[in-house]
Amino acid sequence: MISDELFRLAFEYRKTKLWHKVPVSMIFAVKLAGGEIGYISIVDSDRANNGLELYIGEKGFRSLCAILEADTWMSLEYQERLIEQQCLLCTFEMKHALAPYEREEVANYTRSAGIKLAGKNAYPQFIKCTPGCYPWRLEDDGEKAMLCEALAAAIELSKLLEKKLPIELGLMDYDDEKQEIACFEKKNGRYELGFIKLPKKESSKWPAPQASNDIGIANLKKMKKTGIWECGLLRFYRPIQNEGEEIPVYPIILLALDISTNYILPVDLAVHYEENPEELLNFFINALIQQNICPKKIKVRDDRTYTFFKMFCEKLKISLSMEDKLPILEDAEYEFYEHFYMDEEEVLQKEKEMMDLGYSIEWEETEEKSSYKENTKVTSIYARIEPSYVISVSLGAGCYRHIQISGQSTLYQFHRAILDAFQFDDDHAHAFFMDNVCWSQKDCYYTEIVENGHRTTQKCKLNKLGLQKDDRFKYLFDFGDEWTFQCKVLRVLEEQTPQAIVIKSKGEAPEQYGAWD
């Protein structure tokens, strides 16, 4: 249960709108009551909903550094680093994003405190991020107390910024050469601002199998070694939950390809890889034995995969090398992710086109949380590359976003990408008018909640619309306020886009709702 004090500080922090004054790259710290240092990052709506992240101790600091040093927040690398995040988080969400018990707690507090909730993302949510796990509800009272301290320090910082600029307080953007940062410490009941030295950076320590399947190794030694294999460990972006109360986890997948045949070895998912890397190694060995294959050479591109294979290759005298680029593996990754971001009907259709069946994950949605069931099968890569589109979406003069999106995406998914790009909440009906005339009945698609007999955005895919360069069409959101977006196809690309991404942004999006008081 969330305490009144944590709620109070969260609402007070939201009023400061500190994310407008302190960018996400400008971290600071607080000395917690237990003696540990908490590293604080202010979250703005460019990366997620507004909020605050608290990274505790040296492990937490390394987790924060990994995120800040990622190439781009839209990259696969960044997404995996988010999954490896280790922090406590206070974020502000729309009502429908909270579980029923969370909404009830917020309602009870706001009634007793006389607070009226209004505006975008008005509901506080308190989350714990554990590496490799789905972000889960914050339950530990000690961690709730630490998050209170972080919010209090952030509120104090906002007061100081009323009179001084961040640089005058010693706040500067993070870089890997930085030696110290500003730190709040509570003395005599008040927070004082000073400086602390940052922990020394350490290279990542990856799990290494400590024991191998000796019988399996002996069987592989009898086989003739053939083929050059490109291999990589990937984090699967859909969590799996074995029990109802267990925190869902993101399993690790081993992609192993024979580059001469493009054959992908069917290796089972490893659900708890960090704690038990031997499990995945055994899956790999068993898959090799079942297929009567033993690699002659294995190529990897990162330290994590190299560490995983090192002992195995030494025992079998298999050549192991690390290279910057593994193009066949990279193509397989993108097709793999594209496959799993499709809807169920498309997955079934694609499975008919594939030589073998691929990994599949079934999921069941409940109002409170999602539960996932694992179903592993042999995986393969289908060769055909679906087109992607770069579409300019403008909302008035000087305000536009260029969105790259897969042709496999539906108009509904494009609608969600547009709202994310302009930071709008998806709480109203929408429609697309492909003849570029709003309210035209000629070539239109509506959301399923509008029962007017028209085709729906949920069932229409972009690659079925015959889009060509320079085609224009309208997207209408909220039939009351009639937010009208002009769309124009800028490019048609023969490449895959696993997730819709904003590749260019200009102009500040207008407020969807009035200011929150």
Image (cartoon, grey):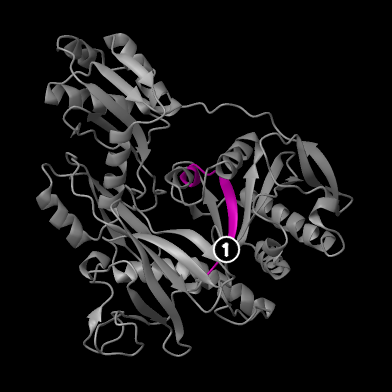
| 55 vs 506: above or below | above
Residue 512 in the image: state x and y as whole percent. Answer: 54, 79
Q: Residue at x 31, y 29 (%)?
A: 231
- Rendered-image quadrant of the C terminus: bottom right
Q: Which residue is drawn at 30% across and 52% down?
A: 372
Q: In the shown orientation, is residue 474 left or right of residue 122?
A: left
Magenta span covers which residues? 81-93
Q: In which quarter of the image is residue 20?
A: bottom right
Residue 310 in the image: state x and y as whole percent. Answer: 37, 17
Q: In terms of depth relative to the viewer, which is nearer, 202 or 465?
A: 465
Residue 291 in the image: state x and y as whole percent. Answer: 13, 25
Q: Is residue 91 visible?
A: yes
Q: Residue at x 64, y 53 (%)?
A: 24
Q: Can residue 98 be seen in this view?
A: no
Is residue 299 in the magenta section? Answer: no
Q: Quadrant of residue 155?
A: bottom right
Q: In terms of depth relative to the viewer, which is nearer, 136 or 207?
A: 207
Q: In the shown orientation, is residue 389 left or right of residue 3?
A: left
Residue farthest front in this picture: 470
| 514 vs 361: above or below | below
Is residue 87 in the magenta section? Answer: yes
For label 1, the residue is 45
Residue 3 in the image: state x and y as whole percent. Answer: 64, 62
Residue farthest right in this picture: 188
Identify which amino acid the numbered label 1 is placed on. Answer: Ser
Q: In terms of depth relative to the viewer, which is nearer, 386 or 339?
A: 386
